Image (cartoon, rainbow, N blue to C red):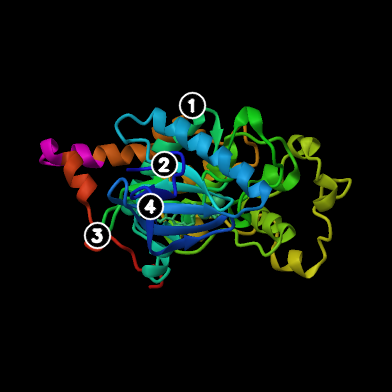
Amino acid sequence: DFDDENGAYIKVNKDQIAYRYEIIETLGKGSFGQVLKCFDHKRKEHVAVKIIRSKKRFQQQGMVEVNILQHLKNIDHDNSINVVHMKEYFYFRNHLCISFEILGINLYELIKKNNYQGFSIHLVRRFAYSILQCMKVMYKENIIHCDMKPENILLRQKGSSAIKVIDFGSGCFESQRIYTYIQSRFYRAPEIILGIPYTTAIDMWSFGCILVELFTGYPIFPGENEAEQLAMIMEVIDLPPAHILAEASRRKLFFDSKNMPRNLNTKLFKKRRVGSKSLAQILKTTDTNFVDFVSRCLDWDPAVRMNADDALKHPWILELKKKSSKDVRPKHRHRREAETSIEHDNTLRNFTN
Ligand code: ATP
Ligand code: MG
Ligand code: MG
């Protein structure tokens, strides 16, 4: 009955052709295209279909997304690496389309729903641990996501704190980097801004930025342009070390011959003084383990920055294990954790107080 060659249609009989995917609603939009909730009449289930813009560059990158997703799905035997599962891909009227399992809302929408108040340290740690499951595998497989941000992390379903990472549409294998200009600006690692060959460490930078945003409700470095992005970073982590600048092909755009920021006397730098803000101040917390964790994500030097394996051994993450081992009903531990409801998480913190 079904025509497998042509993923978008199903053959009903000899003369009659019906569409396979019935559009229910729009789930989201991004720079690559739009994502629709559809009913797949062949699989008899709801799916999310990402329809990629028809321009050649987007199609090519779309196939990279397909390849990375396929690679990750192949090693995700027990659905534990927290990466969205691709179902199929096909072409429809010159558009590459990818169908996925349906997930819940993204973490930016969740932050917004919570009135930008930020989440409790406990919830932020649970998110961090889940995201690290994906980052650990990417680190091992030498895959760079290149667009880690709250919009690309989705709740698995309503009312659960379990997540999956989506949108590998900017991703690449470390050995096959194509683009030099990647990542969304707020989450962009300094080596991208400065023009230094990048590694999986750029995702760790973004991850640090995401954790701050989950905790405070606001992006830590919301630069309106690259110069401001760098100025905001330097406010918190001082000037880049000389050996980093020595590798930077774009150094002259931002620094003078003495490695001092250009235009130090401009309005921008009067407003944003180098080294004038501490992470503890921004986070408004006395949790020194959390501050230390974030500071190890936000290191100028990608070689010094934590990798996902280091991060999973950090005391701030290990506190999660301590807490759950105190659980009086260890038998039900995993189930209880999976079912923790955000709505009922009384540790949601009112940051505005
Ligand atoms: P970007 O501009 O970040 O590159 P994009 O065009 O590559 O975005 P995606 O990030 O893949 O597109 O998807 C856009 C939005 O659609 C997501 O932020 C999310 O809100 C929604 N979305 C994507 N996949 C799913 C899914 N499987 N289930 C539910 N919602 C989804
Ligand atoms: Mg996206
Ligand atoms: Mg994308």
- For the residues carrying marks 1 and 3, which lies nearer the camera in this image? 1
- Looking at the image, tell me whether mark 4 or mark 3 is earlier in sequence order: 4
Q: Secondary structure at mark 1?
A: helix
Report the Cα–Cα distance between label 1 and label 3. Answer: 33 Å
Front residue of this view, candidates 279 and 93: 93
Question: For mark 3, does the 10 Å Cα neighbourhood hold few (<14), some (14 to 19), or many (20 or more) residues?
Answer: some
The residue that appears at 40% across and 29% down in the rendered structure is: 74
**Residue 251 location, quadrant:** top right
Q: Identify the residue at horizontal 82%, vertical 65% (top origin).
A: 265
Callout in the foreground (4, 2): 4
Whichever of labels 1 and 2 marks the residue nearer the N terminus, that label is 2
Disc assigned to residue 86: 2
Mark 2 to mark 3 CA distance (whole Å)? 31 Å
First-in-chain label (4 vs 1): 4
> Callout 2: few (<14), some (14-19), or many (20+) C-alpha neighbours within 10 Å?
many
Residue 345, labelled with which disc?
A: 3
The residue tagged with tag 3: helix, strand or loop?
loop
Name the residue type under label 1. Answer: Lys
What percent of the width, then of the height, locates residue 335?
Answer: 17, 43
Q: Kindly identify the amino acid type of the residue bearing the numbered disc 2.
A: Met
Q: Earlier in the sequence, mark 4 or mark 2?
A: 4
**Of 216 and 43, the residue lying toward us:** 43
Q: In terms of sequence position, does the residue under pointer 1 or pointer 3 come before the other? A: 1
Query: How many other residues sit within 10 Å of disc 4, few (<14), some (14-19) or many (≥20)?
Result: many
Estimate the x, y position of residue 96 in percent, counting from the top left: 54, 48
Q: Quadrant of the N terminus?
A: top left
**Given this view, does label 4 or label 1 mark the residue nearer the observer?**
4
Say whether marks 1 and 2 touch (CB < 8 Å): no
Q: Which residues are magenta?
A: 323-332
Q: Of all residues shown, which one is farthest toward the front? A: 15
Q: Which mark is residue 20?
A: 4
